Image: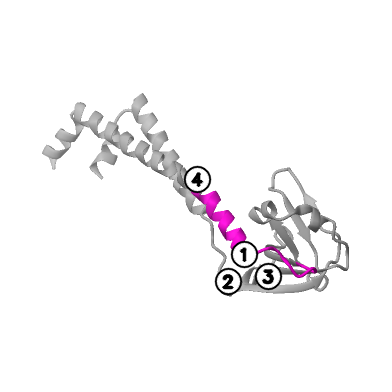
Amino acid sequence: MNILKIIIESDESESNVKAWIGLILICLLVSLVLYYYPSVNNEKNLIFIEGKLLDKPELSEGGENPDYISIYLKGYENRFELSGCGLELIDKKIILKMSPGDSIKLCVDKSDLYQSKTFLNNSVKVLGIDLNSGKKSLTVAMINNCERIGWKRLLVLTPFLGLFLVISLFILIRRAYKEGKLQNQSTND
């Protein structure tokens, strides 16, 4: 704690500013890692919903939000959304060619389905699709595998940023010793 006190009390030299920026970047990275860590979909929380399409599925591309396909089923007021890894793994043309009245079986998280929805968030994430042909077009295992692979790409950067943090702290401690602030602090205690 004494080191942080010294850093805060010291004049804002260029090296201190760089160290603080590095520390802030590390904290930001940790926050992003925790936010985007792939949640593996637990098989026992999933349910299959069989139904007929109310409307033709629509692909929403670009803009501020990631791409997704909206699916509306008769008897459900929620919008079922196929996005992320699910959208990457499935042949979009097959889904988009479907017509109102076609049968489809969707796999969703039961807590997501029964969660109260708002005007802005009325979608339920699709975790698997079985088409009326009987073959599984998209499985939960496929989505989980895709999310884990995407996570590994981000995980590769973590050791480099950790090394940057250690080097930054080493530089800060060395400067504090050179300025004599750590020696003076230890003799005053």
* Cα–Cα span, label 4 and label 2: 25 Å
**Residue 136 location (% of width, % of height):** 70, 66
Question: In the rendering, which numbered label is found on residue 43?
Answer: 2
Q: Can residue 102 be seen in this view?
A: yes
Of the two numbered discs 3 and 4 on the same chain, state the one appearing first in sequence.
3
Which residue corresponds to mark 3?
113
Amino acid at dot 2: Glu
Which residue corresponds to mark 4?
154
**Residue 25 location (% of width, % of height):** 44, 39
Which residue corresponds to mark 1?
140
Amino acid at dot 4: Leu
Q: In the rendered structure, which segment of residues is drawn in magenta?
A: 131-153
Left or right, 14 with respect to 114, comes to: left
According to the image, what is the colour scheme of the structure? one colour
Q: In this view, does 174 lie above or below 49?
A: above
Query: Tag 3's secondary structure?
Result: helix
